[in-house]
C-alpha cells in the first residue's frame, strides 16, 4: 500500500484542520481500509474562543460522515480536558458517554460526536487514525491471532484485547499505551475490530497507518494467504430470475416490507461459495461486529427463508439482553444469501443499502478467506455480535417509518419503458428502484439503465430480475403492454401490496 500524499495538494490546505481532512480523504478512498461511514480520524489543536482565549480541543470526525468525502465542517470540536475527565471515570455506558460528550461540543451545529471520541482523546499524539483494514482483520480474527499480531506488529502497535466500541475500548487503549508504549510505537491493533495509528503531524500519522497495514499484508503474502480462490460465474437464466423473485417475495414477507436485492457473481464470490468449508467459515460471524448491522451475523445458505428466520429468532431469544424491548429487535429476514446458482444475493430496504451490504460482505469474504489460509478464522461470540446489531442497527426501520412520506414507494421496483422516461426522476424521488429501458440518464443509486427493447422479451426481464430481484410495476403509456410470459410470472411474485 503506497502513500497518496501529494505535496502540492497538501500545500493548498489553509490550516491544520483542512490538512487533517485531506489525509482523512486519502484513507477513506480505499475500501480495504474503511467501508460506508466506518473509520474515523482526529486532530488535537487549540480552539479559539470569541474573547481571544483558547482551550485544548479534540477535532474528531463526526458520526456517520463518509471519510472519503470529509471536510473540516464534518469534524466535531470537543473540549479535550472534558473528554479526558470522562475517560477518567471508572465506568460509563454508551448512553452515559454520549450524554457526557454532548455539552463538550465547542460548536453547537457540529455533527454528533463519534462513538470513538474517547479513544482519540486517550492517545497523546496530535493526529490519530482509526480504520478497519482488511489485512489486519485477516490476522487478528484467527485462533492464534493474538500471538501472530505480536509477532507481526511487536511494539510498533501493541495488541488491545477486544472491547466494544466506546468507553470500554478507550479505557483499554489508554491502559495498553501506558503499559506497552515504546519510542517505536506508532499505533495499536484492536482485536476483532481494526487498527489505530498516530503521529505528531498529518503526513506522519497517515503514513504510519499505511506502514502497519503493509506489515499485515507482507505477512499474509509470505504465508500464501493473499490470493483468493475464484470460480466461473453461473449463467443468468429464466429459472434464476424466477428464483430471485421468489426469494425477494419471501424475504420481504419476513422483514415486513418490500426488499431490494442485488446479485454479485464475481469470480471471488463464486470461488468462496464453492469452498468445501463454506458453512464452517461463513457461520463464524463477521470480522468486526458492526458489519452485522448490514449483513446479519450469518448468511442464508440456499433459499429456505423460513428456516433461517426460525434460527435467527432463536439466536435473538438466546442472546438478547434481559429486558430488551422486543420492538427494538431486528427482523428475522436474511440480508446475505449464498446460493450456488444465484451467487451472492444481498437484501436491504433500498438499492443503495443493498449494494452497500453486498460490498461489505465481499470484504468479509476476503478477510475470512485470507484468515483461513494461514490459520483458523474466528469471529466474536454471538452475544457480542448481537450487541452491535442492537446498538448500531435500526436504520432500515427508521427509513420505513417515513413511508408513505417522503418515500411512498420505498422498496419497490419499477420498470420504465422508453415512452415514459420523464417518470424516472419522480419514481427515484419516491424511493423506488428504477429499471429504465432505452433512457439517457446519469448514473444514480437505484437506477439501472438497459438498452431499448422492441418487446419485453425474457432476456430483458431476466436482466431486470438480476438487477433488483424482481418487478412490481411496469410504467408505460402503451395500452398493448399486458404482462405476459416471464414478465407476468415475476409481477405475480411481487411483495408489494396493492
Image (spheres, rainbow, N blue to C red):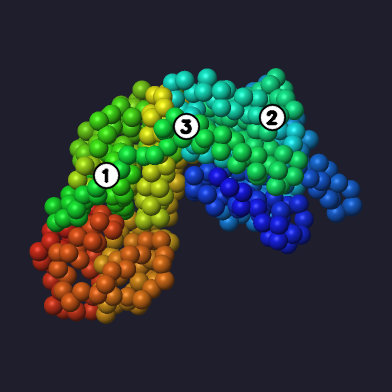
Q: Percent position (x, y) of residue 367?
A: 42, 36
Q: Is residue 217 visible?
A: yes
Residue in the picture at 14% in, 64% down: 458
Q: Which residue is denoted by mark 1 in the rendering?
A: 231
Residue bearing mark 3 = 222
Q: Can you see residue 328?
A: no
- Residue at (37%, 61%) from the top-left corner? 446
Q: Nearer the viewer, residue 87 or 224?
A: 224
Give the Cα separation between the discs numbered 3 and 1. Answer: 24 Å
On the image, numbered disc 2 is attached to which residue? 185
Instruction: Count all numbered tags in the image, as a single digit.
Output: 3
Q: CA distance from mark 1 to mark 2?
A: 42 Å
Please tell me whether mark 2 or mark 3 is closer to you in this view. Answer: 3
Label 3 crowd bin: few (<14), some (14–19), many (20+), radius 10 Å: few
- Regarding mark 1 in the picture, which secondary structure is present there? loop
Residue nearer the viewer, 316 or 355 = 355
- How far across and down, in percent of the image, does residue 98 sit? 63, 37
- Front disc: 3 or 1: 3
The answer to which of marks 2 and 3 sits earlier in the sequence is: 2
Amino acid at each position: 500500500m503506497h502513500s497518496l500524499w501529494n505535496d502540492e495538494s497538501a500545500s493548498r490546505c489553509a490550516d491544520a484542520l483542512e490538512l487533517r481532512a485531506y489525509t482523512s480523504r486519502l484513507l477513506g478512498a480505499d475500501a480495504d481500509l474503511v467501508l460506508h461511514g466506518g473509520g474515523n480520524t482526529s486532530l488535537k489543536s487549540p480552539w479559539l474562543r470569541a474573547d481571544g482565549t483558547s482551550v485544548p480541543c479534540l477535532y474528531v470526525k463526526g458520526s456517520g460522515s463518509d471519510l472519503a468525502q470529509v471536510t473540516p465542517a464534518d469534524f466535531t470540536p470537543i473540549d479535550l480536558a472534558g473528554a479526558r475527565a470522562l475517560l477518567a471515570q471508572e465506568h460509563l455506558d454508551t448512553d452515559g458517554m454520549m450524554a457526557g460528550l454532548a455539552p463538550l461540543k465547542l460548536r453547537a451545529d457540529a455533527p454528533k460526536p463519534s462513538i470513538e471520541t474517547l479513544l482519540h482523546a486517550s492517545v497523546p499524539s496530535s493526529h490519530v487514525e482509526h480504520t478497519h483494514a482488511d489485512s489486519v482483520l485477516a490476522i487478528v480474527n484467527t485462533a492464534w491471532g493474538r500471538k501472530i499480531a505480536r509477532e507481526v506488529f511487536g511494539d510498533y502497535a501493541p495488541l488491545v484485547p477486544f472491547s466494544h466500541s466506546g468507553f470500554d475500548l478507550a479505557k483499554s487503549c489508554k491502559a495498553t499505551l501506558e503499559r506497552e508504549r515504546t519510542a517505536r510505537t506508532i499505533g495499536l491493533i484492536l482485536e476483532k475490530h481494526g487498527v489505530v495509528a498516530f503521529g505528531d503531524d498529518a503526513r506522519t500519522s497517515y503514513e504510519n497507518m499505511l506502514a502497519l497495514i503493509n506489515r499485515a499484508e507482507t505477512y499474509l503474502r509470505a504465508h500464501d494467504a493473499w490470493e483468493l480462490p475464484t470460480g466461473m460465474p453461473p449463467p443468468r437464466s429464466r429459472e434464476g430470475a424466477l428464483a430471485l423473485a421468489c426469494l425477494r417475495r419471501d424475504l420481504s414477507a419476513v422483514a415486513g416490507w418490500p426488499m431490494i436485492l442485488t446479485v454479485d457473481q464475481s469470480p471471488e464470490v463464486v470461488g468462496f461459495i464453492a469452498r468445501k468449508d463454506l458453512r464452517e467459515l461463513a457461520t463464524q460471524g463477521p470480522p468486526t461486529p458492526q458489519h452485522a448491522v448490514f449483513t446479519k451475523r450469518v448468511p442464508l445458505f440456499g433459499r429456505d427463508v423460513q428456516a433461517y428466520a426460525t434460527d435467527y429468532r432463536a439466536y435473538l431469544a438466546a442472546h438478547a439482553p434481559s429486558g430488551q424491548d422486543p420492538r427494538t429487535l431486528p427482523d428475522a429476514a436474511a440480508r446475505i444469501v449464498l446460493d450456488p446458482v444465484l451467487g451472492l444475493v444481498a437484501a436491504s430496504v433500498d438499492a443503495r443499502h443493498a449494494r452497500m451490504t453486498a460490498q461489505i460482505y465481499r470484504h468479509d469474504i476476503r478477510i475470512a478467506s485470507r484468515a483461513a489460509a494461514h490459520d483458523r478464522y474466528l469471529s466474536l461470540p454471538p452475544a457480542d455480535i448481537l450487541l452491535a446489531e442492537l446498538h448500531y442497527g435500526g436504520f432500515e426501520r427508521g427509513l420505513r417509518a417515513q413511508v408513505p412520506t417522503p418515500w411512498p414507494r420505498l422498496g419497490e421496483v419499477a420498470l420504465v419503458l422508453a415512452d415514459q422516461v420523464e417518470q424516472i426522476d419522480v419514481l427515484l424521488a419516491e424511493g423506488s428502484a428504477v429499471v429504465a429501458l432505452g433512457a439517457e440518464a446519469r448514473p444514480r443509486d437505484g437506477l439501472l439503465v438497459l438498452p431499448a427493447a422492441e418487446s419485453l422479451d425474457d432476456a430483458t426481464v431476466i436482466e431486470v430480475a438480476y438487477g433488483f430481484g424482481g418487478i412490481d410495476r411496469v410504467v408505460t403509456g402503451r395500452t398493448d403492454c399486458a404482462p405476459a410470459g416471464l414478465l407476468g410470472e415475476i409481477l405475480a411474485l411481487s411483495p408489494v401490496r396493492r
